[in-house]
Image (cartoon, grey):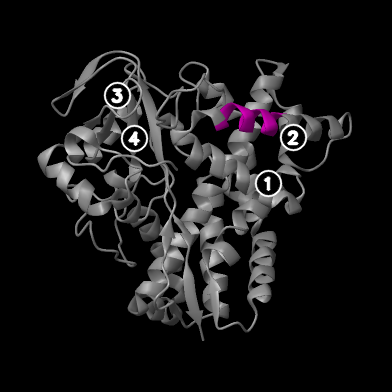
Amino acid sequence: MGKHAPVSDWGTDFDHRDPRWIENPFPIWDELRVRCPVARSARFEDGAYFPSRYEDVCEIAYDSEHFSSRRVIVREKKVPLQSAPPITSDPPEHTPARKLLLPAFTPQAIARLEPRARAICRELLDRIGDRKEADAAVDYAQHIPVRLIAHMLGLPEDDGELFRKWIHLVLEVGISDESVILPTLQEMSVYFSAEINKRGDHRGDDLISFLLDARMSGQPLSEPHLIGTLRLLLIAGIDTTWSGIGASLWHLAAHADDRRRLLEEPALLPTAIEEFLRAYAPVTMAREVVKETTLGGCPFKEKGQVMLSFPAANRDPSKFAQADRVLIDRAENPHVAFGLGRHRCVGSNLARLEMTVAVDEWLRRFPNFALAPGMKVTWSEGTVRGPRRLPVTLS
């Protein structure tokens, strides 16, 4: 990303591209909840807002009258609207677009993917082998969702590097450099058009074939709808989950007591995964203000961009006891890592499976690991947060 002037006041000039925010946003959010629960910034076209309280995030998420989902990423300069249904859809178009995806993401459908997920993890762990050091993000976490979503879509798993390039350009570089967005989306459209043409009249057991056979109001999906949904499934199915896996491994590398407890109590793993989702929720979505309103004492102006931070909501002490602590046995955990309302993540079952399997397989292979001394952990830049470099020692 390019260079930006450092933030001097988070309440009136926030910037999620600031290195301090990227490295450790939690103290910033804590400050904002007390001093200025809805921060503002003129660094983004038409202005941007950042609500930091659980109740405000919830209110915006359920309010489609004032806040539209047509823009899902806060960018320095807005780009022409790009359809990626159902995530960019508002009522009434949203419901049928989401409904047609649900059968492919039921708990039963996702459970059938567990053997493939474990095989991918074990292959990656075999590659690490007997090394004494590894990068748990680059060597492991960043491959798992790439290969599994490719498997689901019926795409070559060897195209993972191409998929990672697209994600980097769309979700990181494109926040500050809008010139990369349209060429990248066009490249993705050409790629998916070729995959659609490959299937012709011969369908396979994959999500592209599933969508080709899907019907809305009795009609096949239009090409823009189909390709927009495929772009969404690829992007949303990769960066979010590899960030969740990476953050979970980062926590266990940095907190030996929690790592040892999971080894002693493996049945606790699903509860721990929910806490990792709360504490290190990777996804911040966006909304666009389509009708002026006031929330948290702050006026929201039409056309403004809103950073709808589910991670900040998950750290609100008014909702979660000891919100700043990661408690892997937290019994009550109404986190919003997967969003709220009509736009709650359709792939939540898949993400949970991938995170649970990835952490389980890693701990089986490397029960003793820690952050590599003197090596820097780097975090992603943008609205999806997770470790991009995670050097660890293995024993």
Which quarter of the rendered picture does the N terminus lie within? top left
Tag 2 near tag 4, CB within 8 Å: no
Q: What is the span of residues highlighted in magenta in the rendered image?
A: 180-189
Query: Which badge, 3 or 4, is on the more N-terminal residue?
Result: 3
Mark 1–mark 3 distance (CA, rounded to whole Å)? 33 Å
Query: Going from the N terminus, do you reach mark 1 or mark 4 first?
Result: 1
- To which residue does mark 4 refer? 308
Task: Kindly give the residue lying farthest to the bottom in the view shown.
Answer: 395
Question: From mark 3 to mark 4, how far is it between C-alphas?
Answer: 14 Å
Mark earlier in primary sequence (1, 2): 1
- Mark 1 and mark 2: Cα distance apart in space: 10 Å
Check if residue 183 falls in the magenta segment: yes
- Which amino acid does the dot numbered 4 rest on? Leu
Residue located 42% across and 82% down the image: 264
Q: Which quarter of the picture shows residue 375?
A: bottom left
Proximity of marks 3 and 4: CB atoms separated by less than 8 Å: no
Q: Camera-side residue: 176 or 192?
A: 176
**Marks 1 and 4, how far apart at CA:** 28 Å
